[in-house]
Image (spheres, rainbow, N blue to C red):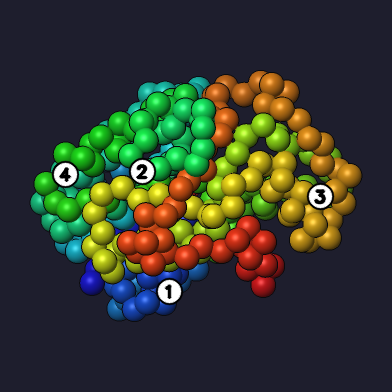
Amino acid sequence: MKILITGANGLLGQHLVNELLQQQFQVVATGKGPCRLPFEPSEKFSYRSLDITDELEIEKVLSEERADVIVHSAAMTQVDECEKNPELCEKINVYGTTQLLVDAENYSKYIIYLSTDFVFDGLFSPYREDDDLRPVNFYGFTKMQAEAIMHTSEIPWAIVRTCLVYGNPLEGTRTNIVSWVRESLQEGEPIKVVSDQQRTPTYVEDLAKGIVLMIQKQATGIYHISGKDLLTPYEMAMRTADYFSLDKSLITEVTSETFTQPAKRPARTGFDISKAVKELGYSPSSFEDGLKQMSQ
Ligand SMILES: NC(=O)c1ccc[n+]([C@@H]2O[C@H](COP(=O)([O-])OP(=O)(O)OC[C@H]3O[C@@H](n4cnc5c(N)ncnc54)[C@H](OP(=O)(O)O)[C@@H]3O)[C@@H](O)[C@H]2O)c1
């Protein structure tokens, strides 16, 4: 089976390519600009440049590759940047998804879209797949719009919502909550971390495995795929410091009001993952297990 991934240079994309190759799938990784993946071209792996805002390029790549499955992971993901530059955010996250789906309908058989806990308002947690969508920032709004586009698909489709992904990138230096805490404390830098938000942080390799399970089962509809521990960012930071034997006194507990950020964050998200566990056999690591895997 041939799988085409958009945004393959990103944190999830890198690990998804890796997991698919280990499971002997044929993978076409695509991303904006040159390849930043640590794999050599082979019968099983190729890379193509694909900017999802370029309609002609999407048509060309999808028609030439005719992949069985598209995993659409590319997005403008920096939440504050999305708030400051809504036109670009909409162009990538909404119009890019619209165009990709048009061509996926013509040249592929099944599409999986990556969405987020930020489609929810954060007034309660954990969220289930059928809870009402009420995003509180522009990033979340565009992901909600892209989800609505998926619902119109003429080929089988699935939406995977995930939450606060962490792990080591295979290449590059893009940070996530754990890498940021670990690196700051290793350098002796004090950090402020909020304790009035909740998430179910997701170890990136678990997410990649969850998506592979979806491909194997050709699962359709919406799935919440995240970690199983509901934690505040402050708790995550303290546990990270504990695990890596770093100086916890550098961590200051604060509330969201301390930060003036362009984009509002939903307070309490995090997922009920029982559907994915029951229907897919998804089995995520605990937060500590994720840290352990990062340290190996
Ligand atoms: N990370 C999280 O905590 C989290 C949580 C919930 C949902 N998600 C969703 O999961 C998906 C994967 O996220 P991630 O963590 O892997 O984020 P990421 O590391 O930021 O990856 C996103 C990728 O999309 C690429 N991209 C941006 N604009 C593009 C364009 N016009 N054409 C093609 N590619 C483009 C980026 O390219 P460059 O690398 O060149 O910038 C990047 O490689 C996203 O859809 C995100 O919304 C992530």
> Within 10 angstroms of label 4, few (less than 14), some, or many (20 or more) residues?
some
Q: Report, in whole angstroms, how far the alpha carbon at label 3 lies from the one at label 1.
A: 35 Å
Q: Earlier in the sequence, mark 4 or mark 1?
A: 1
> Cα distance, mark 4 to mark 1?
34 Å
Tag 3 secondary structure = helix
User: Sequence order check: which comes first, mark 4 or mark 2?
Assistant: 2
Residue drawn at the location 15% of the way across and 58% of the way down: 109
Figure quadrant of the C terminus: bottom right
Q: Kindly state the secondary structure of the residue where label 4 is placed.
A: loop
Assess disc 1: are there few (<14), some (14-19) or many (≥20) residues with their C-alpha within 10 Å of its C-alpha: few
Is 198 on the left-hand or right-hand side of 239? left
The residue indicated by pointer 2 is 129
- Residue 99 visible in image: no
Q: Looking at the picture, how far across and down is residue 120, in whole percent?
A: 44, 32
Whether the residue carrying mark 4 lies under 8 Å from ligand 1 is answered with no
Disc 3 crowd rating (10 Å Cα; few below 14, some 14-19, many 20+) is many
Q: Which residue is mark 4?
A: 153
On residue 40, the disc is 1
Name which residue lies at 41% across and 33% down: 119
Horizontal relation, residue 106 to residue 178: left or right: left
Cα separation, mark 4 vs mark 2, equals: 18 Å
Q: Nearer the viewer, mark 3 or mark 4?
A: 4
Residue 262, image quadrant:
top right
Q: In this orientation, which residue lies closer to the viewer: 288 or 146?
A: 288
Chain-order first, disc 2 or disc 1: 1
Amino acid type shown at disc 1:
Glu
Q: Residue at x 67, y 31 (%)?
A: 196
Give the distance between the C-alpha atoms of the residues marked 2 and 3, in whole angstroms.
Answer: 36 Å
- Give the mark, 3 or 4, whose residue is nearer the N terminus: 4
